[in-house]
Image: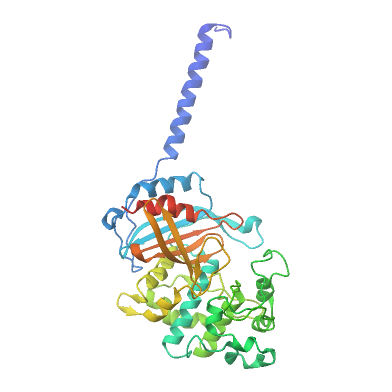
Amino acid sequence: MIFKNNPLYILLIVLSCFLAACEDDKSINSSDESYVYTVPEKTDDGWETAALNSVGMNASPLEILVDRIRNNSYTEVHSVVIVKNDKLVFEAYFPGHDFYYSGENFHGDYIDFDRDTRHDTHSATKSFTSALVGIAIDKGLIPNVEDRIFNYFPEHSSLIDSQKEKITIEHMLTMSSGFKWNEWDVSISQNNHDIVRFNRSSDPIAYLLSKPVITEPGQAYYYNGGGVDLLGQIVRRATGMNVKSFSDINLFSLLGITNYNWQTLYPSRITCCHGDIYITPRDMAKFGYLYLKKGDWNGTQIISKEWINNSIQNFITPPVNWAYGYGYLWWLKRYTSLNGIYNAFNAEGWGGQQIIVIPSENMVVVFTGANYVDNPPNDEIMSNYILPALD
């Protein structure tokens, strides 16, 4: 019998604890292996794939990034996709929370996101709506961006005043209509939030057009999602097709995009154009690539070069510190890294949804996520990992 005060007993206890600790360390290491880059799989979705080093990119910073997302140094990042020199060269997907308006932190079910999972793009949808306006103009179905918005809503002519009659399609595209609108001024959880009231209205267009104009149209930036839905209704009335059908025939099908879904507002039953297209990150990258290539997709001119060029001009300065300008529902930004300063134009959505186009690098970067109450880490990731990967 070995007694507890016996040195041999103490030695056995210490040895057993050491072996147990080693076993624990082995378990931790085996389940927490560092990420090793692999070339994205080529599928039948139209993307050509290639290795990072074949397009002048270094895998090491991106491997570190994936490990940091996996160990929760960055939380609720659901996907990172990179297209460089016409090839899909990087994609990584991570588990996280789906969007749920009534959930804590707007989080719903915890799911494993992958390349086939549609993601809510939130306000990045606005840039898709801009494209539809451009296509309708290219086809001569809408005369031009100087067309007055009330030309399309004669049933609301009683709401016209001396200021409202000046408002054009371009004012709606650049968020400079002058309508009084509190979308950025109050919490979305408050009942007086204009986009919430707009969404719940039986006639949301009338709700918007009845608002007073408080600045000269074209002079000041007011973030206004309702104005983007109004653009969607202009597309519908000008083309004789609902937004879903028009976009499918003239945009998505031409890009080979089938796994997407527009949302519908109730009770009005109009297509929600200010947000919430559900689409995959690979297909988000296609849309960004279309703009990178001035509207051309594999030899088909889907949108005119003129519209693309106009869309990414700086029309007005938004009151934010993370973008220097605003085009036709596209944000104009600059990213800084040790490699230099990069000009970009972005589709941006709540929670960390981004389509980032960097023309100087022939590159598109896509993020999805669920950082609805915290600032998304995307800008830090761009500066510290993605842009430094450029050799």
Q: Quadrant of the N terminus?
A: top right
Front residue of 263 and 196: 196
Which residue extends farthest left? 54
Residue 73 visible? The answer is: yes
Is 294 situated above or below 235? above
Front residue of 117 and 268: 268
x 34%, y 76%: residue: 296
Front residue of 235 and 381: 381
Residue 271 visible? The answer is: no
Q: In this view, does 82 lie to the left or right of 221?
A: left
Front residue of 360 and 246: 360
x 45%, y 34%: residue: 27
x 61%, y 74%: residue: 224
Which quarter of the figure has residue 213? Answer: bottom right
Which quarter of the figure has residue 122? Answer: bottom right
Is 189 situated above or below 290? above
Return the x and y of residue 232 as percentages of the image width and height: 54, 81
Which residue extends farthest right? 191
Return the x and y of residue 287 as percentages of the image width and height: 42, 71
Q: Is residue 368 left or right of residue 360?
A: right
Return the x and y of residue 106 as percentages of the image width and height: 63, 59
Number of callouts:
0
x 43%, y 45%: residue: 67
Is 202 situated above or below 351? below
Return the x and y of residue 317 as percentages of the image width and height: 54, 70
